[in-house]
Structure formats: C-alpha cells, structure tokens
Amino acid sequence: MKRTTVLMLASIGMMTSAIAQADPAPVAGSTVLGVTVVELRQVALGWSTRREVIGKGVFNSMDEKIGVIDDVIFSPNTTASFAIIGVGGFLDMGKREVAIPVPQIALIDGKFMLNGATKEALKALPAFVYAQ
C-alpha cells in the first residue's frame, strides 16, 4: 500500500510564523528569548530544511530523477513559498536553478515528487537568480 503524504514545507513557515507571533508570558526582571516548552515540541516535530530537504532528489511520476532541491525560499510572511531546484549539468557544471511553488511538490513514499515534470520541462523554465 502506497503511503502518500503531501509535502509540508509550508508547515515550516506556518510553524515559524506561529512561533514569531507567540506572546509569551512576561518574566519579572528578565526578557524572554527563544521558544516555550510547548513551542519547542512543535519545532521538534517539524521539518529540518538542512537535514530533510536540501540536497534531496526530485522525481517525476515515472520515477525519473529530474532535479535536486538546492534551497527553499520563504516569503516575507515566513511561509515556505518556493523550492529552488537544480536541473541539468554534470557535477554542477552547466546546472541551473528554477523556482517551483512548494504546493506543487509532494512527498510520496519518502521521495519528493513533481508529477508531470520532465528534465526538459524544468530546463525550459526561466532560470532562478537570487536578488542582489
């Protein structure tokens, strides 16, 4: 039985937003920094972008590897908006990056999937370039 789970990169952003918006109880004589015990439990259950997302392959519905997740872009409101996927090239020579909206990516049986995509389709997208 295939277990299908929608990629919850966006939950990282929502969790980050919730932590940023949390109004911890004031502590007499000191400033509260960091997260509460309850928030820390939420963080522990969330995704680690560095450990579980960056560098992972992206596959299409035919189980062909079509790229690698190089980065995740967070919008100003702290939600994960785009996955930056490196496509093409060999040993990073000739590789280019494209931005894919996070909701288009799913985690299926432990693999990041971009259904309907091909290497050629990704290479045809405009290249992603970081702002200066």
Image (tube, grey):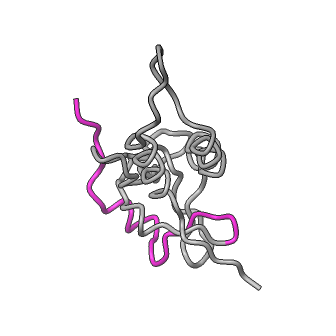
- Asked if residue 63 lies in the magenta stretch, the reply is no
Is residue 55 found left or right of 114 in the rendered image? right
Q: How many marks?
A: 0
Q: Where is residue 28? Give x, y as percent.
A: 48, 19
Outermost residue to the left: 132
User: Picture quarter containing residue 107?
Assistant: bottom right
Residue occupying image coordinates x 41% and y 66%: 120
Residue occupying image coordinates x 35% and y 46%: 78
- Where the N terminus falls, by quadrant? bottom right
Q: Main secondary structure of the magenta part?
A: loop
Q: Where is residue 108? Give x, y as percent.
A: 63, 72
Q: Is residue 102 above or below residue 132?
A: below
Residue occupying image coordinates x 45% and y 78%: 116
Q: Which residues are magenta?
A: 109-132
Residue occupying image coordinates x 46% and y 64%: 119
Give whichever of 19, 30 is nearer the camera. 30
